[in-house]
Amino acid sequence: MIERRDNDRGCAAGIVFAVAIEADAFERLATDVVATRAGAATIYEGLVAGRRVAWCVAGAGRIAAAHAARLLVEGHRPRLLVSAGFAGGLDPAIGRGEVVRPSQAIAEDGTMPLPLASGTPTEPTTIVTVGRIVGTTEEKAALFARSGARLVDMETHAVAEVAQAAGLPCAALRVVSDDAGQQLPGEVTALVQPQSTLRRLGAALGAVGRRPGAAVDLWRLWEHAVVDGRTLAAALAELCGTLPTSAS
């Protein structure tokens, strides 16, 4: 059931996920959850690690992420925006399944780099936001050499832009779903597009029909994603536990 809720207190953080599997395990940690319909999007708010946080599953890409981030800022007044989810590894030194909190977001088009609230990282880490899936090892190596970024995603720079415009800090918390040496199945691009569950199932079945080996590849990715989602949820809960409980 969807409720509308007036938020006059603000919340500790507003978290933007791209796809549902990134958010599922985190949502199971939340209590006292209410939901607000905002056009086609749904914003959830609840308690995690004793802090009130809001989150949205935006869909993949810059436009969707920026729209969700603005909804969180306008409707829930977070004191921190967070871009959370999976990322591709570009630096061969970063392994699959690692949790990374980048210190800077850049865009492939050369848009101004934006700082990210990264705590005390052992070394500065840049994430580059692009407009497509970077799935082959050759593409990853070329992007690493060109950008110097150690990670790639499709949302973080856009969320950081919204945060900057609102005068808010922004953090990114990413689990490496595929490392620099891993080749992604070509079918992944179709499956991350905004669509209903039924259409996504149809896309998966169509992929298997065209390439039977896709069934094994996609199932392995799904298993990894479930584990990565739990890893992400634990890291987000730890982050939430460090945030102030009330507005300063």
Image (cartoon, grey):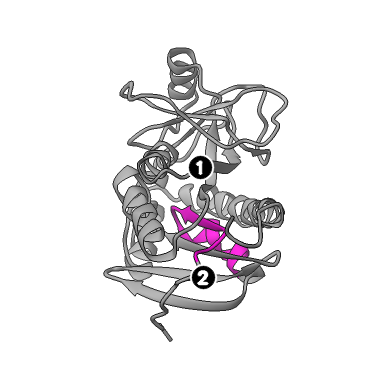
Return the residue found at the far top.
145
Q: Which of marks 2 and 1 is nearer the N terminus?
A: 2
Asked if residue 44 lies left or right of residue 178, the reply is left
Q: Where is residue 30 in the image (x, y as percent from the top left)?
A: 63, 71
Magenta stretch holds residue 185: no
* Residue 121 x %, y %: 69, 30
Horizontal side, residue 213 vs residue 202: left or right: right
Q: Name the residue under label 1.
A: 169
Which quadrant of the figure has residue 129? top left
* Screen quadrant of the C terminus: bottom right
Mark 2 or 1, closer to the camera: 1
Question: Who's the residue at 43% across and 23% down the image?
Answer: 139
80 versus 116 height, above or below: below
Q: Kindly identify which residue carries mark 2.
A: 45
Q: Which of 161 and 8 is in front in this view?
A: 8
Which amino acid type is shown beneath numbered disc 2?
Glu
Mark 1 element type: loop
Residue type highlighted by circle 1: Pro
How far across and down, in percent of the image, does residue 175 sit?
A: 61, 43
Seen in the image, is 29 located left or right of residue 169? right
In magenta, the rendered stretch is: 10-27
Residues at discs 2 and 1 in contact (Cβ within 8 Å) = no
User: Which residue occupies the foreground of this view, 42 or 8?
Assistant: 8
User: Gap between marks 2 and 1, in whole Å?
Assistant: 19 Å
Residue plotted at (54% across, 45% down): 86
Secondary structure, mark 2, is strand
- Crowd band around label 1 with a 10 angstrom C-alpha radius: few (<14), some (14–19), many (20+): some
Numbered circle sitting on residue 10: none
Look at the image and say whether residue 19 sits in the magenta stretch: yes
Quarter of the image for residue 146 reads: top left
Camera-nearest residue between 52 and 129: 52
